[in-house]
Image (cartoon, rainbow, N blue to C red):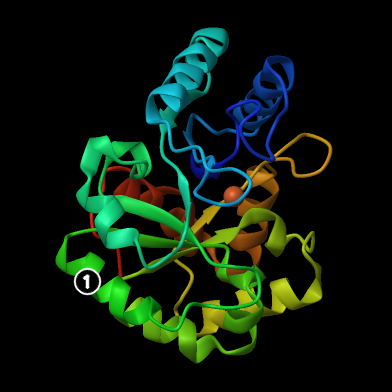
């Protein structure tokens, strides 16, 4: 499996605080069948700005060396969405944004309870720039959970979603699980990832989530969510709908 949302670079956000914890977290993911992790530290989210790509890359190289390729860690980021996104993406490798596996799929997160009013417009502009937007954990966003039509509108602009493995297992409460089920009914679930942060607070749990999807939504859907669509976004292909 490829896990496209994972906080594994130590000491730069609310993920692991040191190398031992980072290595243990990644190894736990490997034990669950994850072969590749996209490192997605928070970027431009106070207090974790992490604008220095070179520093992020240094951490990633060292983590790969410590893990010996099991699992492999590839670059990415979780960008806290703002109106500057077009300019930031335009800066390419000079800027702070990195697509998943350095491709053209960008993982974005919204504030917990709202979606910026200009998101549809900006998503359209990003699609014109051939950026595949991946919306991180919409089931944990208050506005999207209560108003799935808004998520439909965003996906109509070319975005796809990433639902959190733990949400399906009830770890984020009943509202997040109910939202994920409603998104599924509307065809708005495109990928699953762990959003792992630590073994104690936010472990990976991808294997359990995959079993849940197979049982509830069927094995064909599990292959789509855990394999074909995540492979497509890490290759930067345009996924669905
Ligand atoms: Fe995250």
235 displayed left or right of 145: left
Is residue 1 in sight in this rendering?
no
> Which residue lies at the image location 59% right of the left edge and 43% below the top edge?
48
Of 78 and 213, which appears nearest the observer? 78
Q: Mark 1 points at which residue?
A: 125
112 displayed left or right of 203: left
Is residue 61 in sight in this rendering?
yes
> Which residue lies at the image location 45% right of the left edge and 23% below the top edge?
55
Which residue is farthest right? 200
The quarter in which the C terminus is drawn is: bottom left
Above or below for 169 versus 124: above
> Which residue lies at the image location 78% right of the left edge and 34% below the top edge?
199
> Which residue lies at the image location 59% right of the left edge and 78% below the top edge?
114
Above or below for 75 versus 128: above
Where is residue 149 drawn, in percent x and y?
A: 48, 91
Query: Crowding at label 1, few (<14), some or many (≥20) Cα neighbours within 10 Å?
Result: some
């Amino acid at each position: 499996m490829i896990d496209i949302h994972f906080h594994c670079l130590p000491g730069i956000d609310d993920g692991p605080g040191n190398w031992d914890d980072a290595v243990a977290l990644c190894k736990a993911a490997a034990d669950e069948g994850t072969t590749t992790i996209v490192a997605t530290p928070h970027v431009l989210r106070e207090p974790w700005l992490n604008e220095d790509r070179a520093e992020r890359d240094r951490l990633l190289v060292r983590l790969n060396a410590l893990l010996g390729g099991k699992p492999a860690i590839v670059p990415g980021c979780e960008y806290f969405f703002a109106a500057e996104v077009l300019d930031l993406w335009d800066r390419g490798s000079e800027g702070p944004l990195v697509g998943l596996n350095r491709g053209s799929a960008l993982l974005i997160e919204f504030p917990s309870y709202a979606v910026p009013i200009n998101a549809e417009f900006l998503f359209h502009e990003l699609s014109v720039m051939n950026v595949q937007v991946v919306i991180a954990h919409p089931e944990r966003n208050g506005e999207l959970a209560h108003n799935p039509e808004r998520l439909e509108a965003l996906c109509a602009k070319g975005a796809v979603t990433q639902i959190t493995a733990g949400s399906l297992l009830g770890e984020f409460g009943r509202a997040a699980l109910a939202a994920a089920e409603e998104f599924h009914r509307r065809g708005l679930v495109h990928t699953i990832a762990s959003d792992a942060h630590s073994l104690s607070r936010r472990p990976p749990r991808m294997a359990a989530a995959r079993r849940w999807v197979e049982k509830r939504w069927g094995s064909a859907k599990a292959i789509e969510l855990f394999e074909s669509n995540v492979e497509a976004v890490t290759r930067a292909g345009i996924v669905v709908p």
